[in-house]
Image (spheres, rainbow, N blue to C red):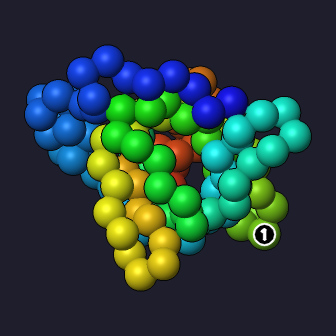
Amino acid sequence: MLGQEGTGGGASSGEAAEARLAPRVNVSWRARVLLSAQAFIEGRALNVSEAGVSLLFDRRFPDGVVLTVALGVPEPSDRARLRPVTAQARVVFHVASGDLFRHGLVFTQIDAEARKLIRHWVVHLG
């Protein structure tokens, strides 16, 4: 689902700084924004940290909106196998990049196993 508009129009400067302080690594993972049970928008994850993710889509999402995102994260033991990771994330910023839009998101809800998997890649790719 697309989610709800955030109050105050996005992250506070403290939240944004906290997200930037988390170590992040460049990736090229499949990503989706889930609009409904049957509808989604396909994109790419450009970088990831335990605090959030940068995603590239052909659609702009407004700052402050909370999205349901799904990432195809490689399995540590076999990079050819992808583990689906679903999380709630708030759009902190967006910027045009050619015909596409790069979005910076901060995770608002992600389960412990998904965070552990992301941590693995941040440590091993960092």
Image coordinates of residue 5 in percent, x first then y, are 44, 25
Most foreground residue, 46 or 111: 46
- Going 70% across and 41% down the picture, which residue do you hit? 34
Residue 51 placement (x, y as % from top left): 37, 38
Classify residue 8 as left or right of residue 17. right
Between residue 49 and residue 102, name the one nearer to us. 102
Q: Quadrant of the C terminus?
A: bottom left
Residue occupying image coordinates x 49% and y 30%: 66
Is residue 49 toward the left or the right of residue 21 in the image?
right
Residue 13 in the image: above or below residue 52: above
Residue 12 in sight in this render: yes
**Outermost residue toward the top in this view:** 7
Amino acid type, label 1: Ala
Which residue is painted at 62% across and 33% down in the image?
Answer: 2
**Towards the viewer: 48 or 104:** 104
Could you tell me residue 42's position as x and y percent?
69, 60
Residue marked by disc 1? 80
